[in-house]
Image: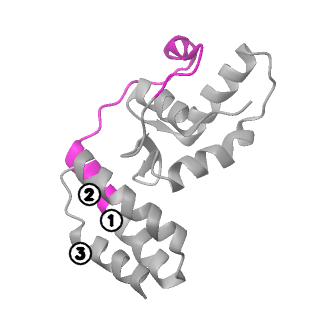
Amino acid sequence: MEFTPDELAGIVDLFGALDRSALQRACVELAYKRGADREPAGFDDAIDAAVADYHLLVLDDELLVPGPIAFPELPEGATDLPHILDVESRTIDRDRLAGAAQRRFRADAAAAVEAGDRERIEHLLDVSYELEVWAPVELAQARRRLDDALGE
């Protein structure tokens, strides 16, 4: 059973934030409800891809939150998850989240430029605009660096 990045963001959004193991348990529960038997680690690749694409962001090396390009969508049966999982709902400070997102974006931009990864650079350019709307961050300098890398 596969979950889209927006569905993963929807599950996380239902709780405000989740650690990776809670998100894996949520995916296992939803898979079970649909008759698919999965191990929690079976969802690692989907979670990693959602983080890499900015559908999810990692805060403090442990909490996943919906990211700037996510359009959180609840998969079928997800509304039952708060009753199934023993997880408290969380509220994340937006300034703390914005700072973490900005640091990650700058690091990702630098790595993409250094690697000369045109596809990643183009994706990050798109993310930069979404991120500036999503959080109070200024990414003009990083965007110029990405633009310059594409011009070479």
Q: Earlier in the sequence, mark 3 or mark 1?
A: 1
> What residue would you read off at disc 1?
103
- Whole-percent x and y of residue 142? 29, 73
Mark 1 closeness class: few <14, some 14–19, many ≥20 residues within 10 Å:
few
Please, is residue 17 above or below residue 60 in the view?
above
Who is closer to the viewer here, 20 or 104?
104
Secondary structure under the numbered disc 1 in the rendered image: helix
Residue type at mark 3: give it: Gln
Q: Pointer 2 and pointer 3: residues touching (CB < 8 Å)?
A: no
**Gap in angstroms between the C-alphas marked 2 and 3:** 16 Å
Q: Pointer 3 and pointer 1: residues touching (CB < 8 Å)?
A: no
Which residue shows up at 33% across the image and 65% down it? Answer: 103
**Gap in angstroms between the C-alphas marked 3 and 1:** 13 Å
The magenta region covers 73-102
Q: Pointer 1 and pointer 2: residues touching (CB < 8 Å)?
A: yes
> What residue would you read off at disc 3?
141
Which residue shows up at 30% across the image and 61% down it? Answer: 102
Which residue shows up at 42% across the image and 79% down it? Answer: 150
Where, by quadrant of the figure, is residue 94 drawn? top left
> What residue would you read off at disc 2?
99
State the residue lying farthest toward the front.
Answer: 151
Please give left or right for residue 85 compared with residue 58 in the image.
Answer: right
